[in-house]
Image (spheres, grey):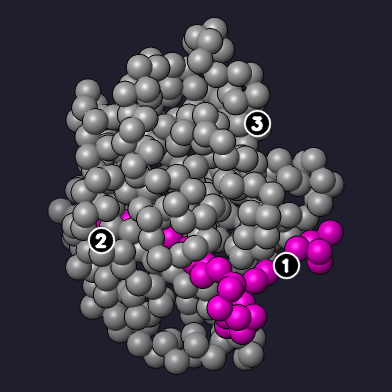
Amino acid sequence: MIASLSSDDGPAAAERGASSPKRGVYFLANDSVLDIVIAFLNSFRIHNPTIPLCLIPFASDLDNISRLSEIYGFSIYRDEGILRRCDDIANTLFSQRPFWHRGHLRKLCAFEGPFDEFIYVDCDTVILSDVSFAFQFLGFADFVFAHSHDPGMKRWVWKESISTAGVLSEEQIALSASTGFICSRRKQLTLDETERRLPEVLSIGEHLEWSCLDQSFLNYLAVTSSNACTSLFKIRTDSGLWNIPLEQWAGESPLFRFRNPISPLSNDLLMVHWAGRWCAGRGDRVIYDCLARLGLRSRTPSIKLFMPRKRLWKYFRHYAYRDMLWTLGQGRAQRESRLTSRHAGQLNALNV
């Protein structure tokens, strides 16, 4: 039962004493994904109005996104030494793949950041639930992903050859976790350990599926460590707690009412994730450029023209903040009420 799931974050957790872990959420972004980030932030703060939130810079262009920090209440990770070490790891892993941006491995900063217990979540999502319930599962696991142990995920983590390579057991291969949502602890995976194991990872690189960037790398580090790994999907399946909220890929059939997407048909949606389905391609950019020349667009968006589940995304990108007070109710909306009057003006100043 969902009623048995606790939700410990914010002031209530702090009141329990100094021994309580400092908890928070990280996301990875820069100005090039501003549209995506605004939808993420609107959805996140509707359902998580108080939990600390921290931006890990994907790259150095943060002028526009940093101006949103007061509106949405997030800090920015500034440890340049750790960021450079993450970039160096990426440069080593992706040395033969120059078109893959090194910023993807900056999510490793979450293991070096200020939160004792953290959730990392990709920004190409809309959040449809309070995320803090996931922290309780760190009581019996070291890594809690949103989704794993799904045969359909294997091809996004491993090459077929991994099964016969003799480097991993079938149980290790079966994890095949999505790394768009990770709940773990500070120093559970250290940069020292990651750097030390790079030659080992490179030696089996032909068996890893690199198209999802960091996903195969993080899976390998997780399953070959002494850490216990699970996911919300696995916990829900094994325990029978059928209303534990889960991740849904945007390419799957929808489970929400468009007229009120904040209230899903079922209460078990943690987030909708556009992994691989949102970024504008060459054809999209040609169309956007034509529209700009005709004076129909002032700038080129970063999203696909025909992105799946676009109505849901557009709601959180353009309209969710307007509806926030009605959705949250007066008790939880105090912080939002203070910021709403500034919201439209500041976003307009960014030309978004």
Q: Element at badge 1?
A: loop
Q: Of the numbered discs in the image, which one, if any, rests on residue 6?
A: 1
Are discs 1 and 3 less than 8 Å apart at CB?
no
**Does residue 132 appear to the left or right of 305 in the view shown?**
right
Q: Of the numbered discs in the image, which one, if any, rests on residue 150?
A: 3
Marks 1 and 2, how far apart at CA: 32 Å
Of labels 1 and 2, earlier in sequence is: 1
Residue at 51%, 55% in the rendered image: 185
- Where's residue 152, x and y in %? 61, 27
Question: Which of the 4 image quarters holds residue 235?
Answer: top right
Residue at 56%, 78% in the rendered image: 18
- Is residue 7 in the magenta section? yes
Residue bearing mark 2: 79
Residue at 44%, 52% in the rendered image: 187
- Front of the two marks 1 and 3: 1
Give the amino acid type for the residue marked by disc 3 in the picture.
Asp
Of labels 3 and 2, earlier in sequence is: 2
Give the amino acid type for the residue marked by disc 1 in the picture.
Ser
Judge by depth and name the residue closer to the eye, 210 or 340: 210
Q: Of the numbered discs in the image, which one, if any, rests on residue 252?
A: none
- Where's residue 6, x and y in %? 72, 67
**Does residue 268 appear to the left or right of 277 in the view shown?**
right
Q: Decide: is 64 above or below 144.
A: below
Q: Element at badge 3?
A: loop
Q: Element at badge 2?
A: loop
Range of residues picked out in magenta: 1-30
- Front of the two marks 1 and 2: 2
Give the amino acid type for the residue marked by disc 2 in the picture.
Asp
